[in-house]
Amino acid sequence: MNVENKKNLDEIIFSVLFVAGEGVEKSFIAEKLNLTEEEVEKTIQSLKKKYSGDAGVHIITYKNKVQLASNPAYADYIGEVLNPIREKTLTRAALETLAIIAYKQPITKLEIEEIRGVNNCDYAIQILVDQGVIEVVGRKDAVGKPLLFGTTDGFLKRFNLQDLAELPDYEGLLERIKVIETGDDQQKSDSLYNEFKLPDEEEIPDFLKDEEGVKQIKGDDIA
């Protein structure tokens, strides 16, 4: 796509970065907007000058990528407002998805959907990734190399677990995730999902395509 008015190039690229929310390859911007890499770099430098100092948003670059980021000077204020929002109770779909991942990790999106009996759990996974309780831990050695998900240290910290060995039974985990303190320990089920037959491949959702730094994990490694 040609940029007809390059006087607005700063705002065009800023808009792209705002909507992307994550790092975008400079060469990709140049290719899609039919610009030279020099034009893109010049625009980025212009944006860096404009959004610097006391501005709430800064422009950062890394690994030939460019991204919008909040001004680190305002981190405490941002956390004061956003952290309580992030700690809100998760939806039932997200709760079920998180519990399945916790017990069956590493696990693919399609496997999660098969267990839950739903056609799409992209949104639940995205919410959990955004909250830092799950992450991509590799790719399954199967057709399509689907992403594998597992829980993070943030999951353990948030739900007051020393390690995964302390996981309660499925319903108990749902209650802990919802931050409901019952004070009653339920009997742990050793057969949760163990007999469920899982398929071998899946289509990777757009928001998780091209993840960097993930290692391949053989299908035999899946519990």
Image (tube, helix red, strand yellow):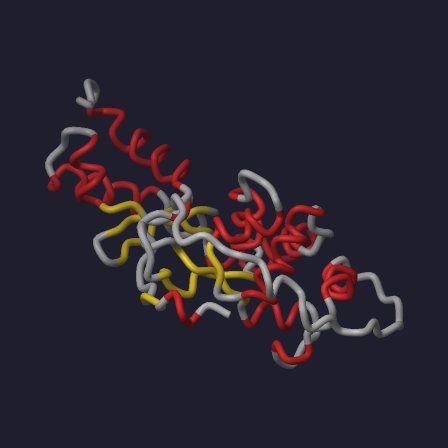
Q: Is residue 140 left or right of residue 34?
A: right
Q: What residue is drawn where x is 53% and y is 68%?
A: 152
Residue at the limit of the structure toward the right, as seen here? 183
Judging depth in this view, the residue of 127 and 9 nearest the camera is 127
The front one of 1 and 175 is: 175
Is 211 positioned to the left or the right of 6 in the image? right
Q: For this rendering, which residue is in front, 144 or 79?
A: 144
Q: Quadrant of residue 16?
A: top left
Q: How many marks?
A: 0
Residue at image coords 89%, 72%: 183
Residue 188, given in percent of the width and then of the height, sits at 75, 73
Determine whether 88 is above or below 223 in the image: above
Quadrant in which residue 176 is drawn: bottom right
Residue 221 in picture, x, y percent from top left: 42, 71
- Rendered residue at 22%/24% (across/down): 7
Which image quarter holds the N terminus? top left
**Residue at the image point whose x is 10% and y is 36% from the top:** 36
| 142 is higher (above) or lower (below) than 168 | above
- Name the outermost residue toward the top: 4
Q: Position of residue 109 (x, y in %)?
A: 48, 51
**In the image, residue 130 above or below residue 163:** above
